[in-house]
Image (tube, rainbow, N blue to C red):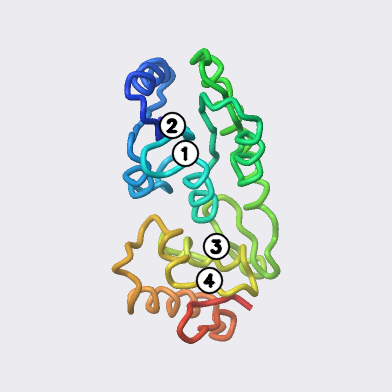
């Protein structure tokens, strides 16, 4: 099933689209309040459909915040006809812009196309060697040898490998992880790092940056 987050203050419009997409095994969870939408756990969804005219917070602000924090495809769905809104949304990082009104069939087609492009990009990115590390699917190879990692260890090491040489804060590591919570910000993250170092057989590859987080060198 495809899970879509929708932030749309017109509940009837959202319900209409949700009912149409349900026949394709697509579940839409809508929030009329943008603040509630942002706090709903954006990273657990496959795609975001975002209106621009929202109560309390402009959709462009929502778009900017989501792009800064998450790697999720965004389709802007708006009745605002100003070309500057479209230009600004795409410049901020939105992937598509579909002006209202539109046929739900078109939205479905754009969802499928966008998710297909993201899937190909993620596959290509995950297969690229990161120095001594290579990520293939759910396995990380270190100097050609497969590492036997727990889900949490895989999430942490893959993030560090994809951003080799760049310090990742504790918050970034935890927010990217699907198996850790913000409560893991203390010693449990340090334990995971320690176990990864042991499996690498090299304590110097992952460096602790005091007061910030960790980086892979």
On the image, numbered disc 1 is attached to which residue?
Answer: 46
Q: Nearer the viewer, residue 123 or 199?
A: 123
Mark before the other along the chain sequence, 4 or 2: 2
Q: Where is residue 169 in the image (x, y as percent from the top left)?
A: 48, 72
Q: Where is residue 13 in the image (x, y as percent from the top left)?
A: 38, 19
Q: Tell me the mark number nearer the camera, choosing from 4 and 2.
A: 4
Q: In which quarter of the image is residue 9?
A: top left
Give me the C-alpha separation between circle 4 and circle 3: 12 Å
Residue at 44% across, 72% down: 170
Mark before the other along the chain sequence, 1 or 2: 2
On the image, numbered disc 4 is attached to which residue?
Answer: 168
In the depicted structure, whether residue 178 falls above or below residue 74: below
Secondary structure type for disc 1: loop
Side of 194 relative to 119 (left or right): left
Give me the C-alpha separation between circle 4 and circle 2: 29 Å
Residue at 37% across, 23% down: 14
Secondary structure type for disc 3: helix
Which mark, residue 100? none
- How crowded is the residue under tag 2: few (<14 C-alpha within 10 Å), some, or many (20+)? some
Q: Tell me the mark number nearer the camera, choosing from 4 and 3.
A: 4
Q: Nearer the viewer, residue 208 or 6?
A: 6
Discs 1, 2 touching: Cβ within 8 Å: yes
On the image, numbered disc 3 is attached to which residue?
Answer: 158
């Amino acid at each position: 099933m495809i899970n879509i987050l929708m932030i749309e203050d017109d509940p009837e419009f959202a319900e209409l689209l949700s009912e149409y997409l349900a026949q394709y095994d697509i579940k839409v969870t809508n929030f009329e309040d943008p603040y509630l939408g942002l706090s709903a756990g954006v990273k657990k969804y496959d795609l975001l459909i975002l209106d621009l005219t929202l109560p309390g917070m402009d959709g462009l602000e929502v778009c900017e915040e989501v792009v800064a924090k998450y790697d999720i495809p965004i389709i802007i769905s708006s009745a605002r006809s100003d070309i500057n809104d479209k230009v600004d949304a795409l410049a901020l990082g939105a992937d598509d812009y579909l002006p209202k009104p539109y046929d739900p069939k078109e939205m479905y087609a754009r969802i499928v196309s966008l998710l297909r492009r993201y899937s190909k990009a993620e596959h290509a990115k995950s297969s690229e060697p990161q120095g001594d590390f290579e990520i293939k699917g759910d396995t990380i190879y270190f100097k050609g040898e497969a590492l036997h990692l727990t889900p949490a260890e895989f999430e942490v090491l893959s993030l560090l490998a994809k951003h080799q040489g760049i310090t990742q804060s504790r918050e970034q590591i935890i927010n990217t992880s699907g198996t850790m919570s913000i409560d893991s910000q203390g010693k449990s993250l340090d334990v995971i790092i320690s176990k990864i170092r042991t499996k690498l057989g090299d304590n110097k590859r992952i460096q602790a940056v005091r007061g910030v987080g960790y980086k892979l060198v």
